[in-house]
Image (cartoon, helix red, strand yellow):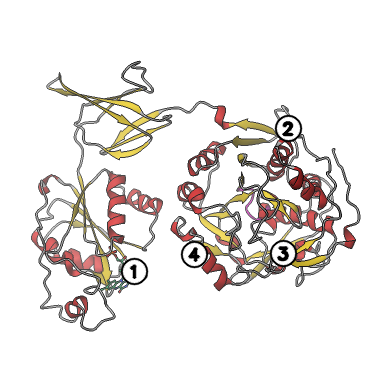
Amino acid sequence: MKNLKKITAFALSLAVLCLGFGLLVRTPKTTTAYAADTGYETIDPDAPEVLFTSEITSESLLRIYKALGFDAEGEVAVKMSTGEPPNSNYLRPELIKDLIQEVDGTIVECNTAYGGRRSSTAMHRQVIEDHGFLDVAKAVDIMDENGDITIPVPTPATGARSTITTNRVGAHLTNYDSLISLAHFKGHAMAGYGGAIKNMSIGIGSVAGKCLIHTGGRSSTSPWGGNQNAFLESMGDATSSVVNQFDGKVVYINVMNRLSIDCDCDGNPSEPDMHDIGILASYDPVALDQACLDLISQADGNTRFLNRVNGQNGFHTLEHAQEIGLGSRSYRIRDIDAEPVAVTMSYDNGRLTVSGLDGEAALIRVSYSDGALAGVDISSVTNGTRNMEVNGGDKLFLWNSLMSMQPLCPSVTVPDGGPKTLVVYYSATNTTEGVAEKIAAYTGADIFEITPSEPYTDDDLDWTDNNSRVVAEHNDPDGRHVELETTDVPDWASYDTVYIGAPIWWGEFSWVIDDFVKNNDFAGKTVIPFCTSMSSGLGDSGRHVAEMASSGNWLDGKRFGTRASEKEIQEWVDSLGLN
Ligand SMILES: Cc1cc2nc3c(=O)[nH]c(=O)nc-3n(C[C@H](O)[C@H](O)[C@H](O)COP(=O)(O)O)c2cc1C
C-alpha cells in the first residue's frame, strides 16, 4: 500500500480560534510542498467504479446520480452542508434542485460544534432559509435538534482495529431509509480535505459525536486536544457506523467546484487556485475521495491544496478507511460524458416527453383522416415534457434536422381517444394555482381558473383586519355570495375526471368556488377535491363541497402545504389510480 506517512508530530498541534467563528485549526507544521499519495486509478475489473462528469449543473448532477442506478427507497436523506455565512462555498440550491426533487429528498444536517451561525437550531434554520434551501427541498431537517443517539461502529471484518467503537449522531437519522451523501469536495483546516468521509462522519455527528471523532473517542464534550491520526481514523470509523445504520443503502456524490483549501464551515474561505473539475459519484466513499484527490494531484494550481492535505496527514483518513474495510483506494473511472445518451420520445395522456437531445430537433406530426394523409406539422423541440394537442392515430417522428432527416428514435403513434381530465381551481395568491398546474401537466388535463368578477385585493384578503372583505364574508355564511366571471367550462360534458382545488380559508374550502360547484352538473364524472393551506388539514371540507354539488362521484380530497413538490403531487395522482 502506498503510504507516505510524512507527518508524525501532531501531538504538538495547536488550537487557535480563527475567522471570527471560533473555527479550530491545528497549525500546519510547514509550508513545504509534499508528494501526494495519489494515483490509485486502475483497470482492475474488481475495483469499485467511480463515475465522472466534467459538467457541473443541476442536470448533470441528476444524470450522474441516475447513472449510479441507486434505488432510493422510502424516506430519503440527502446529507450536505448548509454552509457557514457569509461567503462559504456550499453547494447552491440551484445546483442540487433537480436531484433533491427527483428523490423527493429531505436535506439533513446537524448543528456545528465550533460556534458560528449554525451552532444552534434557531440560527441554523435562519441560515438554511437565507441560503435558499427551503425553495428547492420539501424540508431541511436538523437531525440533532431533539438530541442524539449512540450507534455502534461495527467491528472491522478485515481484522483491523477501529479507533472509536461508538458514534453519536442526530436522533432523526433513524427517520430515514436511504442516504445520499452530497458533499462539496474542498480542503479542510483540520482534516486536510473534506469529501464523502467527512460529510458522513463530522457532518452527521451531533455536537457530542463531533467531539468524539475529533478526539479519537477521548471526549464527548470538547473537540480540542486530540491526536491528529486518531481524529482522521475516527472519521472512517464513524462513516462505517452510519453505513451500518442504513444497511448499506447509501450512495456518495462529491462535487469538485470552488476548490478552496478551506471548508464550507469557514464563512470566509480562501479563493480557489484551481479550476472546477466536475462531479464524481460512487457506492464506495473511499474510492470516491481517493479519485477526487487523484484529480487534484493532476490539476494546475494544486500546490496549496496538496500542502493542506499533507500538512494534516489527510491521506491517512483513506489508509485507515481502507484498512477497516470501508472501501477501496483503488478504483475504476467511468466517464459518463463519453457515454452516448439515448434519445427517447413518448406521448402519454396529452403530454409529449423528449429526452437525450443535444440541443434542438425537428418534430414531425403526421395526421390522418379516414386512413388518408390529412396534414403534416413541423416544429422544433428540446428536451422536456410539454402539453401537446394531437388526435388519436397521429404519428410523431423525431429527426435531427429537416436537412438530413435522420431519425433519432422510433416514431410514436398516438393512441385513440381516451378519458379527458379537467383541473378547475381558484387561487387568491397563486399557491393553489401552482398545484393545479402541476396536476394538469402530469395528467395532461385541461385547466380552468375560477375568477371572481371582483378579484380579491391584498386588503380584501387581510384576515387579521375585522373590516376586511374576507372577514365580513366569513362572518356572514348565509349572506355571502361571490359573483364569478363564468361557471361555464367549454365542452364540460366531455370530461370524465375533474380535479377541483381552492385555498383553505378558516379551515374550509374558500367559498369562492361555491357557485361553480352549484351551477355545474357532475353526473358521470369522478371528482377529486384538493386544497392548499398554511397548516390546516382538509378536515371535512372535501365532504362539504361534495354535499354542495348535486351529483358526481366525489373522492376523498387531498391537502397540500404551500411548498408541495412535483413528486408529492405526482405520487398522489398515481395513488388515485385513475389513468
Ligand atoms: C382569508 C384567509 C384565511 C385562511 N385560513 C387558513 C386556515 O384556516 N388554515 C390554514 O392553514 N391556512 C389558512 N390560510 C392560508 C391559505 O390557506 C394558504 O396560504 C393557501 O395556500 C393560499 O392559497 P392560494 O395562494 O391559492 O390562495 C388562509 C388564508 C386567507 C387569505
Q: Residues within 10 Å of mark 2 (few under 14, many from 20)?
A: some
Ligand 1 near label 4 (Cβ, under 8 Å)?
Answer: no
**Residue at 85% over, 62% down:** 13
- Identify whether 568 is placed above or below 291: below
Disc marking residue 210: 3
How far apart, in angstroms, are the residues tagged by discs 1 and 2? 54 Å
How far apart, in angstroms, are the residues tagged by discs 4 and 3? 24 Å
Q: Is residue 242 visible?
A: no
Disc 3 to disc 1: CB gap under 8 Å = no
Quarter, ligand 1: bottom left
Disc marking residue 286: none
* Percent coordinates x, y for residue 458 in the rendering: 25, 71
Task: Report the residue marked by disc 4.
Answer: 129
How far apart, in angstroms, are the residues tagged by discs 3 and 1? 39 Å
Q: Residues within 10 Å of mark 4 (few under 14, many from 20)?
A: few
The earlier-in-sequence mark between 4 and 3 is: 4
Q: Amino acid at mark 2?
A: Glu
Task: Report the residue marked by disc 1.
Answer: 537
Magenta region: which residues?
244-250
| Nearest the eye: 372 or 578 | 372
**Residue at 55% over, 57% down:** 176
Left or right, residue 60 beside residue 50: left
Disc 4 to disc 2: CB gap under 8 Å = no
How far apart, in angstroms, are the residues tagged by discs 3 and 2? 32 Å
How far apart, in angstroms, are the residues tagged by discs 1 and 4? 24 Å
Q: What is the secondary structure assignment of the residue under circle 1?
A: loop
> Which mark is nearer the camera, 4 or 2?
4
Q: Amino acid at mark 4?
A: Glu
